[in-house]
Image (cartoon, rainbow, N blue to C red):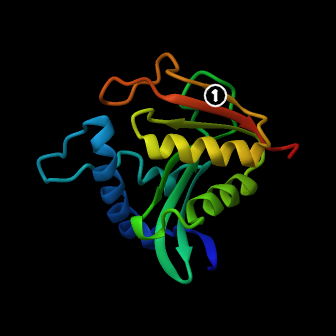
């Protein structure tokens, strides 16, 4: 299985927008978000990935097929010093539980060296187990996890868990 990260070009923005709808639909089971009057969730910062520096969007491609996306920026989720934040991460069902997500996460971490933040929703149990395993393995257990971080609430009011780690010396 060949797993690649491919930078999303501005011409491919509509494809990413479509995948973000699938991602937000799935995530709404945890954060209780509603769709807008057009029946869409939307993504307020999508255009910023082509108009602002320090925002990167990548497709996850498996054997030439679109399998998900990763979005990185330098905006901290919480008041902790950071260079990079994993803004969004999505792997389609067909590609889950076969190493695609782990490989994509590690590839994107390897691309950007510095201090990282990653926020997860504690009700998303599959994500909790996934990120515990991936971050632990990637950092060789050299990370900090703050559960229910103050001022990190999702739309449903649940406080997010925040991973903090640095990979510049890994």
> Does residue 128 lie above or below 100 as drawn?
above
Task: Write the residue at 11% across / 47% down.
Answer: 37
Q: Which residue is mark 1?
A: 145
Q: Determine the residue positioned at 48% across, 63% down.
A: 96
Q: Does 119 appear above or below 4?
A: above
Estimate the x, y position of residue 149 in percent, counting from the top left.
52, 20
Report the number of discs. Answer: 1
- Image side of residue 138 versus residue 131, left or right: right
Badge 1 element: strand
In this rendering, would 22 be left or right of 141? left
Q: Residue furthest top?
A: 150
Count residues near mark 1 (Cα–Cα under 10 Å), then give few for <14, some for 14-19, many for 20+.
Answer: some
Quarter that holds the N terminus: bottom right
Closer-to-camera residue (91/8): 91
Residue 23 lies in quadrant:
bottom left
Name the spot of residue 69 as percent of width and height, x first.
49, 61
Q: Residue furthest left?
A: 37
**Percent position of residue 42, x then y:** 29, 50
The residue shown at (78%, 47%) is 113
| Residue under the point 38% across and 70% down | 15
Using the image, determine if residue 110 lies above or below residue 99: above
Decide: is 68 above or below 47.
Answer: below
Is 119 in front, or is 41? 119
> Furthest-bottom residue in view?
64
User: x, y percentage for residue 86?
Assistant: 57, 45
């Amino acid at each position: 299985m060949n797993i690649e990260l491919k930078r999303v070009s501005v011409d491919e923005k509509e494809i990413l927008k479509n995948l973000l709808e699938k991602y937000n639909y799935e995530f709404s089971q945890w954060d209780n978000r509603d769709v807008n009057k057009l029946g869409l969730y939307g993504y307020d910062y999508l255009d910023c990935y082509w108009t602002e520096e320090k925002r990167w969007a990548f497709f996850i491609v498996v054997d030439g097929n679109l399998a998900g996306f990763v979005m990185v920026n330098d905006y901290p989720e919480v008041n902790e010093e950071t260079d990079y934040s994993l803004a969004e991460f999505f792997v389609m069902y067909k590609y889950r539980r076969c190493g695609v997500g782990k490989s994509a996460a590690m590839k994107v971490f390897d691309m950007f060296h510095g201090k990282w933040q990653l926020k997860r929703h504690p009700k998303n149990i599959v994500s909790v187990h996934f990120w515990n395993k991936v971050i632990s393995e990637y950092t060789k257990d050299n990370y900090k996890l703050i559960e229910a971080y103050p001022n990190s609430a999702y739309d449903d009011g649940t406080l997010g868990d925040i991973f903090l780690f640095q990979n510049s010396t890994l």
